[in-house]
Amino acid sequence: MTWNMQDYPSSMKNLETPIKKKAIDISNRLLEEGYDEGRAISIGIAQAEKWVEAAPPPQHLVPHPDGWAIKAEHGDKASFVFENKADALTKAKEIAHNQETQLIIHKEDGEIEQQLNFG
C-alpha cells in the first residue's frame, strides 16, 4: 500500500502537515524496501520528526536600505543584498531550493507577499 496526504495510517492523523508529509514519504520508501508496515510507520514518524527539527530555517526576501536582502529567519544579518528584487529573488529561490526550506517573499512595506516551499 502506498500512502498519501488523503490516505495515511491513523497514527499519523495528529501530526503537523510538514511532519506528516515527510513521514508518509519515508514510510512509503521503507515499505518498498520490504519493511513490515508497523515498523515502517514508526520509523517514518520518528525520522520525520527529527528531519523537521533539524531543517534549516526559512529564508526571507526583505526590503533593505540598499535594495533587497536575503536573510534566514531570525537572522541578524543579510546573507546577500541586491539592488533589485528580481536578482534577489533568483538567488533566494536558489538558496531555499538547495536548503530544501521555505522562501518567504515580502513586499516593499514588509508585509508577506508570497510563500514558496522547497522542502
Image (spheres, grey):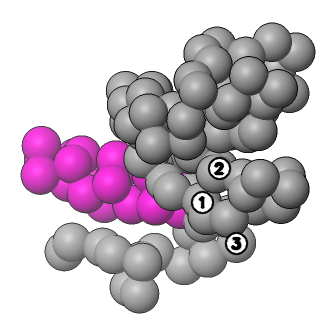
* Residue 85 left/right relative to 37: right
* Residue 71 left/right relative to 83: right
Quarter-of-image position of residue 81? top right
Give amino acid for label 2: Ile
Tell me whether the residue at label 2 lies in contact with that at label 1, contact meaning CB atoms closer than 8 angstroms. yes
The local crowd at label 2, few if under 14, some if 14 to 19, many if 20 or more residues have their Cα within 10 Å, is many
Task: Give the main secondary structure of the magenta stretch.
Answer: helix
Residue pointed to by mark 2 = 104
Residue pointed to by mark 1 = 115
Q: Earlier in the sequence, mark 2 or mark 3?
A: 3
* Residue 32 left/right relative to 38: left
Q: Determine the secondary structure under disc 3.
A: loop
The residue mark sitting in front, 1 or 3, is 1
**Percent from the top left, x then y, of residue 108?**
77, 53
Residue 36 lies within the magenta run:
yes
Q: Is residue 49 visible?
A: no
The residue mark sitting in front, 2 or 3, is 2
Q: Earlier in the sequence, mark 2 or mark 1?
A: 2
Name the residue nearer the viewer: 102 or 114. Answer: 114
Quarter-of-image position of residue 10? bottom right
**Percent from the top left, x then y, of residue 79?**
64, 13
Name the residue nearer the viewer: 110 or 23. Answer: 110
The range drawn in magenta is 19-40
**Percent from the top left, x then y, of residue 40?**
35, 50
Q: Quadrant of the C terminus?
A: top left
The local crowd at label 3, few if under 14, some if 14 to 19, many if 20 or more residues have their Cα within 10 Å, is few
Q: CA distance from mark 2 to mark 1?
A: 5 Å
The local crowd at label 1, few if under 14, some if 14 to 19, many if 20 or more residues have their Cα within 10 Å, is some
Q: Determine the secondary structure under disc 2.
A: strand
Residue pointed to by mark 3 = 14
